[in-house]
Image (cartoon, grey):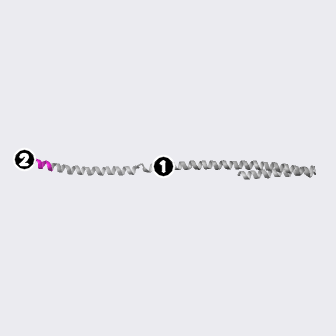
Amino acid sequence: MNIAQVVSLVISGLALIVAILTFAFHRRDKSSEKIDAMKTSQNQALKRIEDTLGDRIDANQQLQEERHRTNTDRLAKIDARLSGVDEALRAIPNHRDYDVLQNTIALQGQSIARVEGALEANTRMVERMNQFLMERGT
C-alpha cells in the first residue's frame, strides 16, 4: 500500500466517523445549527489532516528525489572509475602475451645458435687461411 492509499483510507475512515457522529447527534438533538457547526469543525479538522499528510508526502518525495540524484551521481563516478580500471587491466599483458613472448625469445635463441654455428665455421676457415699464410711465409 502506498502513502496515497493510506491517506485515502484515513480520510474515508474519518468521514465515516463524522457521518456516524452526525447521525447519533442528529437523533439526540434536532438542532441543525449544532450539526452544521460540528460538520464544519470536522471538515476543517479533516482538511488540516489532509494538508499535513500532503506536506509530509511531498517532503518524502523530495527527499527520495534528492537521494536518487545523489546515488545516480555516485554510480556515475563509480562507473567512470571502473572504466579506467578496465582499460588499465586490458593494457596489462596476460598469459597468452607471455607465451607469445617466450616463444619469440626461444625462436631468437635458435636464430642466435645458427648464427653462432655459422660464425664458428667462418672462424675455422679464417684460422686455416691464417695458418696457411703463416706457413708459406707470404
Identity, as a three-letter code, of the amino acid under mark 1: Gly
- Secondary structure category for the residue under label 1: helix
Q: Residue at image x 75%, y 47%?
A: 52
Pointer 1 or 2: first along the chain:
1
Question: What percent of the width, then of the height, locates residue 27?
Answer: 92, 51
* Mark number displayed over residue 84: 1
10 Å crowding of disc 1: few (<14), some (14-19), many (20+):
few
Q: What stretch is highlighted in magenta?
A: 125-131
Left or right of 132, for residue 45? right
Left or right of 26, for residue 109? left
Question: What percent of the width, then of the height, locates residue 23?
Answer: 88, 52
Between 105 and 52, which is closer to the camera in this rendering?
A: 52
Identity, as a three-letter code, of the amino acid under mark 2: Glu
Left or right of 57, for residue 13? right
Question: What percent of the width, then of the height, locates residue 11?
Answer: 78, 51
Dominant secondary-structure state across the stretch colored magenta: helix
- Secondary structure category for the residue under label 2: helix
* Mark number displayed over residue 135: 2
